[in-house]
Image (cartoon, grey):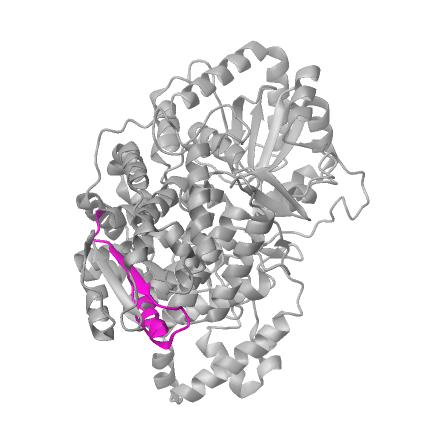
């Protein structure tokens, strides 16, 4: 429910508020993702006719491309998009701004729209006393980052919908999340809040303005990190110990309900396991990935993961599906497969990839952003089953086995229906039921296909079909890695199509990027995560296809990223670049929350590109980033696990592997297969074909690495010391496996 607070002149200087804002900006907020969603454990949404269906007059969002803004284009609230027109109106009419931030698949955003923004009484108050602005947080993460920080500092938590009141100069003075229309369970109602704020603005505007000024001053002091410390292998150890101590031994994951997937925690733990040989690190990963893959948070019929689990068991999810979750979890499961060889992880990764390629891919081959949790205005309706439904589709014998395996009961586990999940491993279930394992697998496969076909005829959740460069970069990286480890060329093909679309549509001649593509329009200058994530995808795509253009473009975009986002005074990278709108303050993200920070991803990109090209300027840049954020990270290392993946790479030992051969040679493919199937997070990989010299233009030293006797030859270096070249496959395996 909504939490809110008005900052008075007396309270603005409180140590708590100051420290919270500072920690959020520069240290990251370890509770951000958990708290940000605690209000989103959804009840059943009631059916409610939209204003669009009632043919109401549209507002100023009518011409916007964002699916989220379009959802509000027919509200009776006179919404404006973020921009000069709204700010000037607020100044001219001497009105405060009501800023509401959300995204198209946000359940509680929908609830607040139906309850309040479709309501004429609420609309009349807003239209008379405020200038109302809607923002899609996925289009404008810069706006969301700043004002979410304010909300967290003011209230102790945050989430979406995010609702704030600003001065016409965009300075905040009041914040909250979801507000019901009227008071509920002790939580204030929106109507009461609107009337209170309106009266306060009219009666005591001077005090409001003074408070907003103080808030902005505190925000603006929080930009620079202090630096001065170092990060070592002990930092990695401390992060592991913090994660271990917070691990749920029974059900996997960290903490209690609600439980969120945290893929970079798992990929970090795999790296720590490889470095330390501590079996507990691997156990944490395996326990978590197994329970998630068997749980209701994983779509057992269609593949892909829902946003989070409302319980500690990974059983009942919040049903929305986000592209970034699919990408990051696919990477985690793929790496778990490489580390253990267990097909379960490979199968879950394949399920994710198949879902994305089937349901989340545009005709042009690029990836949509998300799918809603609701269908027909009811949370999860698309995904749940009753025993009778299963019986009608499968028949008596097969339905009994299916229902027993996926725990489908008359009582249900979700609103008298059932979220499919697995209680027992397949082999255990087969033994208990006295069924041949192969026959059971065949029965379940056929049953899933039948139920999936029926489910496809249901009314689907809404799809957010905008294209984000950042999230596509993550998916490109995931597909490239999947193509390598799982030996699936179609994944590489999917990554190539998406990368080429972005390069042709969202990538400019000066190496700058647009953030968003929707309804034929590329728009909004890219933010740090757009650059960092896309470079990540391009590097992995090069190491999969060995198309030099991807590595060359990765280097060029990385250079532009540094030029546009680098903080010359304080070090590290700003979230907003020179081409972005300049807001009330600058921010530098470092906390690895639902998605990793731009600085974390950029650091690993820079390190990998340094090892691939030998460019020592890149190494100096990486060292600067590590130094900039060292003090922050040392305070609570487990909040920065993607950054620590980069640190693990920086500490080394790293391996630089060059294969001198043509890409289509049989022995080349054999060597690549041996490399790709192994978990080698510390390696970079280059291919030097005799017929194509283009790689020599960007990797100067590679010209000397040539095939011996016409055979694919591996040049393997560790920490800048090179072994003798070899085309003996056993020797190659020995060298790549050495730590």
Residue depicted at x 53% and y 36%: 177
User: Is residue 460 visible from the viewing direction of this image?
Assistant: yes
In this rendered view, identify the residue nearer to me: 131 or 467: 467
Image quadrant of residue 314?
bottom left
Residue depicted at x 21% and y 32%: 229
Which span of residues is magenta-colored? Answer: 651-680
Instruction: Give how far across and how far down residue 162 sits, in percent.
Output: 54, 36
Image quadrant of residue 667?
bottom left
Q: Is residue 694 left or right of residue 731?
A: right
Q: How many marks?
A: 0
Q: Is residue 660 a member of the stretch shown in magenta? A: yes
Instruction: Give how far across and how far down residue 283 sits, in percent.
Output: 25, 62
User: Is residue 308 visible from the viewing direction of this image?
Assistant: no
In this rendered view, identify the residue nearer to me: 663 or 20: 663
Q: Is residue 647 a member of the stretch shown in magenta? A: no
Q: Is residue 470 above or below residue 186?
A: below
In the rendered image, the quadrant that contains the C terminus is bottom left
Q: Is residue 354 above or below residue 72?
A: below
Q: Is residue 649 left or right of residue 113?
A: left
Q: Is residue 470 left or right of residue 20?
A: right
Instruction: Give how far across and how far down residue 295 sits, in percent.
Output: 43, 65
Instruction: Give how far across and how far down residue 649 sits, in percent.
Output: 27, 50
Residue depicted at x 44% and y 77%: 405
């Amino acid at each position: 429910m909504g939490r809110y607070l008005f900052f008075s002149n007396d309270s603005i200087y409180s140590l708590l508020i100051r420290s919270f804002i500072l920690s959020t900006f520069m240290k990251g907020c370890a509770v951000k993702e958990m708290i940000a969603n605690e209000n989103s454990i959804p009840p059943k949404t009631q059916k409610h006719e939209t204003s669009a269906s009632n043919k109401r007059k549209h507002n100023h969002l009518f011409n916007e491309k964002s699916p989220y803004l379009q959802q509000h284009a027919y509200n009776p609230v006179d919404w404006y998009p973020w921009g000069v027109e709204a700010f000037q109106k607020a100044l001219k009419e001497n009105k405060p701004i009501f800023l509401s931030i959300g995204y198209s698949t946000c359940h509680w955003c929908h609830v607040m729209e139906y309850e309040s923004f479709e309501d004429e009484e609420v609309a009349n108050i807003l239209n008379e006393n405020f200038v109302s602005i809607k923002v899609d947080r996925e289009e404008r993460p810069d706006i969301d980052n700043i004002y979410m920080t304010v909300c967290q500092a003011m209230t102790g938590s945050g989430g979406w919908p995010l609702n704030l009141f600003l001065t016409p100069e965009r300075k905040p003075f009041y914040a909250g999340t979801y507000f019901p229309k009227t008071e509920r369970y002790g939580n204030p109602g929106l109507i009461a809040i609107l009337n209170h704020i309106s009266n306060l603005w009219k009666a005591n505007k001077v005090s409001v303005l003074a408070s907003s000024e103080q808030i902005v001053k505190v925000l603006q002091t929080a930009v620079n990190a202090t630096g001065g410390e170092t990060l070592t292998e002990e930092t990695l150890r401390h992060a592991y110990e913090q994660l271990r101590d917070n691990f749920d031994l029974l059900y996997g994951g960290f903490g209690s309900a609600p439980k969120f997937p945290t893929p970079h925690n798992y990929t970090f733990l795999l790296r720590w396991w490889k470095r330390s040989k501590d079996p507990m690190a691997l156990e944490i990963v395996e326990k978590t990935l197994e329970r998630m893959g068997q749980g209701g948070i994983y779509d057992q019929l269609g593949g892909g993961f829902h946003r989070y689990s409302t319980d500690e068991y990974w059983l009942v999810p919040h049903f929305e599906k986000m592209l970034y979750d699919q990408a990051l979890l696919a990477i985690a499961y793929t790496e778990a497969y490489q580390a253990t060889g267990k097909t379960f992880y490979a199968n879950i990764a394949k399920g994710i990839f198949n879902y994305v390629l089937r349901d989340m891919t545009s005709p042009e081959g690029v990836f949509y952003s998300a799918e809603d949790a609701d269908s027909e205005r009811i949370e999860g309706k698309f995904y749940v089953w009753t025993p009778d439904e299963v019986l009608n589709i499968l028949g008596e014998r097969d339905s009994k086995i299916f229902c027993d395996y996926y725990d489908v009961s008359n009582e249900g586990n979700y609103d008298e229906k059932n979220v499919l999940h697995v209680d027992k491993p397949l082999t255990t279930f087969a033994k208990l039921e006295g069924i041949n394992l192969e026959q059971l697998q065949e029965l379940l496969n056929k049953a899933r296909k039948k139920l999936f076909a029926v489910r496809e005829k249901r009314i689907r959740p809404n799809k957010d079909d905008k294209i984000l460069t950042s999230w596509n970069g993550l998916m490109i990286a995931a597909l490239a890695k999947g193509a390598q480890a799982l030996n699936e060329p179609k994944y590489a093909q999917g990554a190539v199509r998406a990368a080429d679309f972005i390069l042709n549509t969202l990538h400019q001649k000066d190496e700058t990027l647009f953030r968003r593509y929707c309804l034929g329009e590329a728009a909004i200058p890219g933010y740090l995560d757009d650059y960092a994530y896309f470079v990540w995808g391009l590097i992995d795509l090069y190491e999969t296809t060995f198309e030099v253009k991807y590595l060359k473009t990765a280097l060029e975009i990385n250079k532009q990223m540094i030029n546009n986002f680098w903080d010359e005074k304080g070090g590290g990278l700003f979230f907003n670049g020179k081409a972005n709108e300049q807001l009330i303050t600058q921010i530098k993200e470092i906390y690895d929350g639902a998605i990793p920070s731009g600085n974390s991803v950029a650091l690993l990109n820079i390190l990998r590109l340094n090892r691939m090209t030998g460019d020592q300027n890149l190494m100096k840049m990486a060292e600067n980033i590590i130094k900039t954020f060292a003090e922050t990270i040392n305070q609570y290392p487990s909040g920065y696990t993607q950054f620590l993946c980069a640190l693990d790479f920086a500490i080394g030992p790293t391996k630089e592997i060059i294969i001198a051969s043509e890409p289509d040679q049989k022995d080349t493919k054999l060597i690549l297969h041996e490399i790709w199937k192994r978990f080698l997070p510390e390696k970079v990989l280059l291919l030097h074909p005799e017929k194509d010299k283009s790689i020599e233009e960007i990797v100067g030293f590679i010209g000397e690495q040539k095939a011996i006797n016409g055979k694919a030859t591996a040049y393997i270096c560790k920490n800048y010391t090179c072994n003798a070249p070899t085309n003996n496959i056993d020797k190659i395996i020995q060298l790549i496996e050495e730590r």
